[in-house]
Image (cartoon, helix red, strand yellow):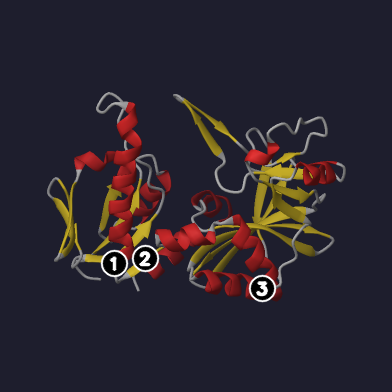
Amino acid sequence: MQNQKILIITSSYDKTCSYLINKFRHLEFFRLDLDRFSDYHITFSLDGFRIRDGNNIIDSVSCASIYFRKPSLENLDGIFENHYHTYIHKETYSFIEGIVESFSGTVLTKPSVMRRANNKVLQASLASQVGFHLPEFAITNDANLLKHFSSNAGIIKPIALGEITCGSSKEFVQTNLIDPTFKVNNFEYSPVYLQNFIDKDFEVRITVVDGDFFPVKIHSENNIDWRKPNNKVSYEACSIPSTIRRNCINFMDLCGMKFGCFDFIVKNNVWYFLEMNANGQWAWLEFETKHNISDAIIRYLMK
């Protein structure tokens, strides 16, 4: 690792990466903020990749590992007409994704692995395969199933994107109880994730980094989704059953992952798998519980 750098691919607003770089000042990092793409000179050729930001340079030889974090694309308003934005963004992301996918060293985590692992249909299948308990659920565009789940205190949530851009503003789609009065007009045009509501005792977020486990018990006033705004939440480090640990490892092995954030609800000592985020946030849990998640991430990137 001497004279080599860790390439972090993210966005300028990513405070977690700022925290990581500041904490490990003895290491050399190269930060590529994709929302500042035009500020860099980036080339891929027969010699591999080369990225320059002023006098700071990283290439395929000097790159020890890549941390693919939270990249977002550059704001092109006032530079190109709107109908060109999608094309430029796709070209940019494809370019950076290709650099990451072709890198032969350590990557946390390749976009192809992340994309596959975050698919909710695949997650449900793998969770059942490795032995997790799951609440009754259906991923569907069938309005009859919506009626079934609404009559049994059901929950509705997105299966892929939780964010809708409306001009200059954004709407966020979160987990909600199904409103029995909800009109099912046009329901067939988009699938949703329906799930039985379980009146949980508590939730658990387990962050796993290369076999190291960092479980956190979450107590929340909101019984539907602890991530909702203005919700009072408390966190504490906790232990987990050996079966849950083994199932998490098997799940990650099937996905080819070294990092993942698992969410469970627990009721009467039964652990129900909700979802796994292959690129979940972790820094706030380090602050709340003193779990050294960042140390585990750096250990893996320095292998």
Q: Which residue corresponds to mark 3? A: 130
Q: Which residue corresponds to mark 1? A: 103
User: What count of labels does the image hold?
Assistant: 3
Mark toward the start of the polypeptide (3 vs 2): 2
Image location (x, y in percent) of residue 56: 16, 51
Are the residues at dot 1 and dot 2 in contact (C-beta closer than 8 Å)?
yes
Q: Is residue 262 left or right of residue 44?
A: right
Q: Which residue corresponds to mark 2? A: 107
Quadrant that contains the N terminus:
bottom left
Q: Nearer the viewer, residue 291 or 220?
A: 220
Alpha carbon separation for disc pair 1 and 3: 30 Å
Q: Amino acid at mark 1?
A: Phe
Alpha carbon separation for disc pair 1 and 2: 8 Å
Q: Is residue 181 left or right of residue 120?
A: right
- Under circle 1, the secondary element is loop
- Under circle 3, the secondary element is helix
Mark toward the start of the polypeptide (1 vs 3): 1
Q: Amino acid at mark 2?
A: Val
